[in-house]
Image (cartoon, grey):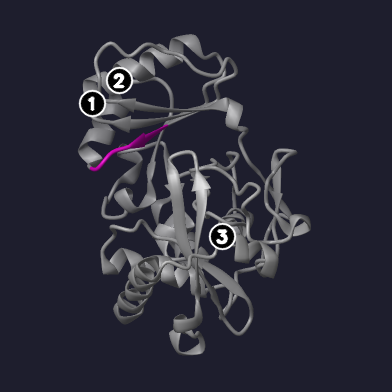
Amino acid sequence: MRTLIDFEDASVFAIPAANGMREGVLIEGPQGWGEFSPPPDCDDVVAARWLTTAMEPGTVGWPDAIRGRVPVVAATECLWVSADQNGWEASGPEALRRAVIEVGDPDVAVTVIQRLTGSATHLELVELVCGAVEIAAAIRRRVQVPTAVDANLLATEKRPSEIADIAVLRCGPLGGVRRALRRAEALELPCLMCLTGITSIGVAADVALAAALPDLPFACSRGAGLPGDDDVVAEARALHGPDGFLPAAPMPAAPAAERLARVRVTDSATIRRWQDLLRRAAAAL
């Protein structure tokens, strides 16, 4: 697929976010556009999965959608917690529906979840962000609320249902819609889709995955948030989800020239860094 794409002319972009600037590259294939936005410190193997995600819509395309739109949980219903300090007190949205727990000390994480469970009457699940399945399994055994764990973390487990109640799918890290669907089938767990795209071009891939899943029991999580005023596509095609739903499409919208110009990176060092990562990711495919 990579021979069909000119990486040298790909546009590097930078968009303001709550936790700083988020960067990535927009690449154009024969059939359309994709977003390459892996973590800047990732290794080449991980970057290659993100590149496969970015190339998929512009080359082989996405699988057919089962549903025309997908639900997205409201920002006011979510809470992100770093559970690495003693003395944490439960606070957050009154109508708390989701909590993402960044696990430091497992005992603290359990205490946080127990307090959230007691204070939030509509808490449907807790996503555990941790680096080991043993930690996730130990926390799950000690709490009453269903726990969700990243699908990549569960990939090597023979019995993933003993680690988590729900698998979290992220299109970018899993290598695109098709690979994510295969992973979901192999795990045999209910799936929660987490949006990883920065622009509407990237989010469109996340929506395509959610739309193609045989079952979608949960509204999609927002991840780092949906695109805002700095999006690269025209407003009519932007994926903001003001009504709680995002429309599925056969392919992403193309960037609007005037909007892309506002966020295009011109710093030569930044461009070289991303071009180097693109070349390494392509070589690792």
Tell me which residue sits at (26%, 64%) in the image: 43
Tell me which residue sits at (25%, 25%) in the image: 84
Earlier in the chain: of badge 3 and badge 1, it is 1
Q: Image quadrant of residue 41?
A: bottom left
Report the residue marked by disc 1. Answer: 106
- Residue 106: say if magenta: no
Q: Is residue 67 above or below residue 99?
A: below
Say if mark 3 contacts mark 1, CB within 8 Å: no
Measured as percent of width and height from the top left, residue 271 is found at: 40, 70
Stretch of the chain drawn in magenta: 127-131
Report the residue marked by disc 3. Answer: 263
Distance between the alpha carbons at the discs numbered 3 and 2: 41 Å
Earlier in the chain: of badge 3 and badge 2, it is 2
Measured as percent of width and height from the top left, residue 26 is found at: 53, 69
How many discs appear?
3
Say if mark 2 contacts mark 1, CB within 8 Å: yes
Element on which disc 3 rests? helix
Of residues 131 and 3, the one drawn nearer to the viewer in this rendering: 3
The kind of residue tagged 2 is: Val
Measured as percent of width and height from the top left, residue 230 is found at: 62, 52
Q: Is residue 204 above or below residue 158?
A: below
Crowding at label 1, few (<14), some or many (≥20) Cα neighbours within 10 Å? some
Horizontal side, residue 56 vs residue 157: left or right: right
Q: Say if residue 185 shows up in the picture.
A: no
What secondary structure do most residues of the magenta stretch adopt?
A: strand
The kind of residue tagged 1 is: Pro
* Disc sitting over residue 110 in the figure: 2
